[in-house]
Image (cartoon, helix red, strand yellow):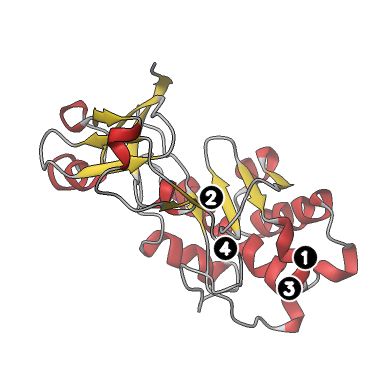
Amino acid sequence: MPLLRQLEFAFQTSRIPSSVAGVSDRGYSARDLQIKAQELLHSLGATRLARGLRVEWNPRLQSAAGRADYREKLISLNPRLREHGEEEIERTLRHELAHLLAQFREKSRRWIAPHGPEWREACRDLGIADEARCHNLPFAARTFPPRFVYRCPNCKAEFPRVRRVRRAVACLACCRKHNGGEFDPRFRLKLIRQGDSAIAGYQSVMSSEVETSLTVGERSEDRN
Protein backbone atom coordinates (compact mmCIF):
# COMPACT_ATOMS: atom_id res chain seq x y z
CA MET A 1 0.00 0.00 0.00
CA PRO A 2 1.57 3.31 -1.01
CA LEU A 3 2.21 5.76 1.76
CA LEU A 4 1.91 9.50 1.54
CA ARG A 5 5.29 11.11 1.66
CA GLN A 6 4.83 14.43 3.35
CA LEU A 7 7.16 17.01 2.00
CA GLU A 8 8.04 20.47 3.08
CA PHE A 9 4.98 22.70 3.08
CA ALA A 10 5.15 26.45 3.53
CA PHE A 11 2.52 29.17 3.46
CA GLN A 12 1.87 32.81 2.82
CA THR A 13 1.41 34.93 5.91
CA SER A 14 -1.84 36.75 6.68
CA ARG A 15 -3.46 37.85 9.90
CA ILE A 16 -5.77 35.64 11.91
CA PRO A 17 -8.35 36.77 14.46
CA SER A 18 -6.98 37.40 17.95
CA SER A 19 -9.68 35.09 19.29
CA VAL A 20 -7.84 32.07 17.87
CA ALA A 21 -4.29 33.23 18.59
CA GLY A 22 -3.76 31.77 22.04
CA VAL A 23 -0.18 30.58 21.71
CA SER A 24 1.32 33.46 23.71
CA ASP A 25 -0.85 32.58 26.70
CA ARG A 26 0.77 29.15 26.93
CA GLY A 27 4.24 29.79 25.59
CA TYR A 28 6.05 28.53 22.56
CA SER A 29 7.16 25.11 23.76
CA ALA A 30 6.58 22.13 21.49
CA ARG A 31 4.52 20.54 24.26
CA ASP A 32 2.19 23.55 24.48
CA LEU A 33 1.72 23.62 20.73
CA GLN A 34 1.13 19.87 20.62
CA ILE A 35 -1.62 20.16 23.23
CA LYS A 36 -3.23 22.98 21.27
CA ALA A 37 -3.14 20.98 18.04
CA GLN A 38 -4.58 17.92 19.78
CA GLU A 39 -7.43 20.02 21.18
CA LEU A 40 -8.22 21.28 17.68
CA LEU A 41 -8.31 17.73 16.33
CA HIS A 42 -10.52 16.51 19.18
CA SER A 43 -12.97 19.35 18.44
CA LEU A 44 -13.20 18.13 14.83
CA GLY A 45 -13.73 14.48 15.72
CA ALA A 46 -10.22 13.35 14.72
CA THR A 47 -9.47 11.74 18.08
CA ARG A 48 -7.38 8.89 16.72
CA LEU A 49 -5.12 11.32 14.87
CA ALA A 50 -4.86 13.52 17.96
CA ARG A 51 -3.62 10.62 20.11
CA GLY A 52 -0.59 10.01 17.90
CA LEU A 53 0.22 13.62 17.04
CA ARG A 54 3.62 15.13 17.87
CA VAL A 55 4.91 18.69 17.40
CA GLU A 56 8.57 19.70 17.36
CA TRP A 57 10.81 22.69 16.71
CA ASN A 58 13.23 21.57 14.00
CA PRO A 59 16.34 23.76 13.43
CA ARG A 60 17.12 21.81 10.25
CA LEU A 61 14.29 23.60 8.45
CA GLN A 62 15.71 26.46 6.42
CA SER A 63 13.36 28.14 3.94
CA ALA A 64 10.25 26.18 4.93
CA ALA A 65 8.07 27.53 7.74
CA GLY A 66 6.89 24.05 8.65
CA ARG A 67 6.56 20.45 7.56
CA ALA A 68 3.85 17.82 8.03
CA ASP A 69 4.66 14.10 8.01
CA TYR A 70 1.49 12.01 8.01
CA ARG A 71 3.29 8.70 8.34
CA GLU A 72 4.95 9.85 11.57
CA LYS A 73 1.98 12.03 12.66
CA LEU A 74 4.57 14.77 13.12
CA ILE A 75 4.49 18.54 12.64
CA SER A 76 7.90 20.23 12.45
CA LEU A 77 8.18 24.00 12.86
CA ASN A 78 11.00 26.34 11.90
CA PRO A 79 12.45 27.96 15.08
CA ARG A 80 12.79 31.24 13.17
CA LEU A 81 9.01 31.60 13.39
CA ARG A 82 9.59 32.87 16.94
CA GLU A 83 11.09 36.02 15.40
CA HIS A 84 7.76 36.81 13.72
CA GLY A 85 5.33 36.53 16.62
CA GLU A 86 2.58 34.28 17.85
CA GLU A 87 0.27 34.81 14.88
CA GLU A 88 2.82 33.27 12.51
CA ILE A 89 3.36 30.32 14.85
CA GLU A 90 -0.38 29.82 15.17
CA ARG A 91 -1.01 29.96 11.45
CA THR A 92 1.89 27.66 10.65
CA LEU A 93 0.66 25.13 13.18
CA ARG A 94 -2.82 25.13 11.66
CA HIS A 95 -1.50 25.06 8.09
CA GLU A 96 0.54 21.93 8.76
CA LEU A 97 -2.22 20.40 10.87
CA ALA A 98 -4.57 20.81 7.90
CA HIS A 99 -2.28 18.55 5.84
CA LEU A 100 -2.53 15.78 8.43
CA LEU A 101 -6.27 16.24 8.93
CA ALA A 102 -6.98 16.17 5.19
CA GLN A 103 -5.10 12.90 4.72
CA PHE A 104 -6.67 11.40 7.86
CA ARG A 105 -10.13 12.06 6.46
CA GLU A 106 -9.31 10.23 3.21
CA LYS A 107 -10.79 6.84 4.14
CA SER A 108 -9.54 5.08 1.02
CA ARG A 109 -5.96 6.00 2.00
CA ARG A 110 -5.27 7.21 -1.52
CA TRP A 111 -2.66 9.91 -1.98
CA ILE A 112 -4.23 13.38 -1.99
CA ALA A 113 -2.77 16.55 -3.49
CA PRO A 114 -0.83 18.55 -0.85
CA HIS A 115 -2.85 21.73 -1.40
CA GLY A 116 -5.96 20.32 -3.04
CA PRO A 117 -9.65 20.66 -2.09
CA GLU A 118 -9.30 18.27 0.87
CA TRP A 119 -6.58 20.46 2.38
CA ARG A 120 -8.61 23.59 1.68
CA GLU A 121 -11.61 22.12 3.51
CA ALA A 122 -9.40 21.23 6.49
CA CYS A 123 -8.08 24.80 6.54
CA ARG A 124 -11.63 26.14 6.74
CA ASP A 125 -12.43 23.79 9.61
CA LEU A 126 -9.28 24.95 11.43
CA GLY A 127 -10.17 28.63 11.10
CA ILE A 128 -7.77 29.62 8.30
CA ALA A 129 -10.10 29.58 5.29
CA ASP A 130 -8.02 32.22 3.50
CA GLU A 131 -4.78 30.27 3.80
CA ALA A 132 -2.35 30.30 0.86
CA ARG A 133 0.04 27.48 0.04
CA CYS A 134 3.31 29.49 0.26
CA HIS A 135 4.67 31.96 2.79
CA ASN A 136 6.51 35.23 2.19
CA LEU A 137 8.53 35.34 5.39
CA PRO A 138 12.16 36.48 4.96
CA PHE A 139 13.75 33.07 5.44
CA ALA A 140 17.05 32.75 3.61
CA ALA A 141 16.98 30.02 0.99
CA ARG A 142 20.07 27.84 0.85
CA THR A 143 21.18 26.52 -2.52
CA PHE A 144 23.08 23.36 -3.38
CA PRO A 145 24.47 21.96 -6.63
CA PRO A 146 22.63 18.78 -7.67
CA ARG A 147 24.69 15.61 -7.32
CA PHE A 148 22.20 13.15 -8.79
CA VAL A 149 19.84 13.35 -11.76
CA TYR A 150 16.91 10.94 -12.16
CA ARG A 151 14.63 10.44 -15.16
CA CYS A 152 11.09 9.15 -15.55
CA PRO A 153 11.16 6.23 -18.04
CA ASN A 154 7.76 7.28 -19.39
CA CYS A 155 7.66 11.07 -19.87
CA LYS A 156 11.48 11.49 -19.79
CA ALA A 157 11.24 14.36 -17.28
CA GLU A 158 14.48 14.83 -15.32
CA PHE A 159 14.72 15.43 -11.57
CA PRO A 160 17.96 16.87 -10.10
CA ARG A 161 18.57 15.87 -6.50
CA VAL A 162 21.13 16.89 -3.91
CA ARG A 163 20.93 13.51 -2.16
CA ARG A 164 20.61 10.01 -3.53
CA VAL A 165 17.06 8.67 -3.56
CA ARG A 166 16.78 5.91 -0.96
CA ARG A 167 13.18 4.88 -1.57
CA ALA A 168 11.17 3.57 -4.48
CA VAL A 169 9.95 6.85 -5.95
CA ALA A 170 8.00 7.52 -9.11
CA CYS A 171 7.05 10.44 -11.35
CA LEU A 172 3.97 12.01 -9.78
CA ALA A 173 2.68 13.48 -13.07
CA CYS A 174 2.66 10.04 -14.70
CA CYS A 175 1.21 8.35 -11.62
CA ARG A 176 -1.62 10.88 -11.60
CA LYS A 177 -2.27 10.56 -15.33
CA HIS A 178 -2.17 6.77 -15.57
CA ASN A 179 -2.80 5.38 -12.06
CA GLY A 180 -5.00 7.79 -10.13
CA GLY A 181 -2.07 9.28 -8.22
CA GLU A 182 -1.03 5.97 -6.66
CA PHE A 183 2.55 4.71 -6.84
CA ASP A 184 3.17 2.80 -10.07
CA PRO A 185 6.49 0.96 -10.58
CA ARG A 186 6.26 1.60 -14.33
CA PHE A 187 7.16 5.23 -13.61
CA ARG A 188 9.86 4.64 -11.02
CA LEU A 189 12.67 7.17 -11.46
CA LYS A 190 15.98 5.94 -12.88
CA LEU A 191 19.38 7.38 -11.97
CA ILE A 192 21.05 8.66 -15.15
CA ARG A 193 23.89 10.89 -13.88
CA GLN A 194 25.76 11.50 -10.65
CA GLY A 195 28.73 13.43 -9.32
CA ASP A 196 30.21 16.28 -11.34
CA SER A 197 28.35 15.24 -14.48
CA ALA A 198 25.03 15.85 -12.71
CA ILE A 199 25.85 19.53 -12.20
CA ALA A 200 26.15 20.29 -15.93
CA GLY A 201 23.00 21.90 -17.27
CA TYR A 202 21.51 22.64 -13.85
CA GLN A 203 21.73 25.66 -11.60
CA SER A 204 21.91 25.26 -7.85
CA VAL A 205 18.77 23.83 -6.30
CA MET A 206 17.05 25.65 -3.44
CA SER A 207 16.87 23.55 -0.29
CA SER A 208 13.06 23.66 -0.26
CA GLU A 209 12.84 22.83 -3.97
CA VAL A 210 14.95 19.72 -3.51
CA GLU A 211 11.85 18.12 -2.02
CA THR A 212 8.83 20.10 -3.16
CA SER A 213 9.69 20.12 -6.87
CA LEU A 214 9.93 16.33 -6.82
CA THR A 215 6.64 15.24 -5.33
CA VAL A 216 6.50 11.49 -5.79
CA GLY A 217 4.66 8.37 -4.81
CA GLU A 218 6.53 5.84 -2.72
CA ARG A 219 6.29 2.35 -1.31
CA SER A 220 6.59 1.68 2.39
CA GLU A 221 9.82 -0.26 2.10
CA ASP A 222 13.21 1.44 1.81
CA ARG A 223 15.33 0.76 -1.24
CA ASN A 224 19.09 0.90 -1.63
Q: Secondary structure at mark 1?
A: helix
Q: Which residue is mark 2?
A: 100
- The disc, 2 or 3, on the residue closer to the chain's N-terminal end is 3
- Nearest to the eye among marks 1 and 2: give it: 1
Camera-nearest residue between 148 and 208: 148
Label 2 environment density (alpha carbons within 10 Å; few <14, some 14–19, many ≥20): many
Labels 3 & 1 near each other (Cβ < 8 A)? yes
- Nearest to the eye among marks 2 and 3: give it: 3
- Nearest to the eye among marks 1 and 4: give it: 1
Q: Is residue 115 above or below residue 137?
A: above
Q: CA distance from mark 1 to mark 2?
A: 23 Å
Q: CA distance from mark 2 to mark 3?
A: 24 Å
- How far across and how far down the image is residue 167, in percent? 39, 26
Query: How many numbered discs sit on the rendered protein?
Result: 4
**Which disc is residue 95 wearing?**
4
- Nearest to the eye among marks 2 and 4: give it: 4
Label 3 environment density (alpha carbons within 10 Å; few <14, some 14–19, many ≥20): few
Is residue 97 visible in the rendered image? The answer is: no
- How far across and how far down the image is residue 153, in percent? 13, 33
Q: Is residue 99 left or right of residue 175?
A: right
Q: CA distance from mark 4 to mark 3?
A: 16 Å
Q: Is residue 207 left or right of residue 212?
A: right
Q: CA distance from mark 1 to mark 4?
A: 16 Å
Label 1 environment density (alpha carbons within 10 Å; few <14, some 14–19, many ≥20): few
**Which disc is residue 84 wearing?**
3
Q: Is residue 137 above or below residue 150?
A: below
Residue positioned 60% across, 60% down in the render: 65
Q: Amino acid at mark 3?
A: His
**Which disc is residue 82 wearing?**
1
Residue positioned 38% across, 18% down in the render: 223
- The disc, 1 or 2, on the residue closer to the chain's N-terminal end is 1
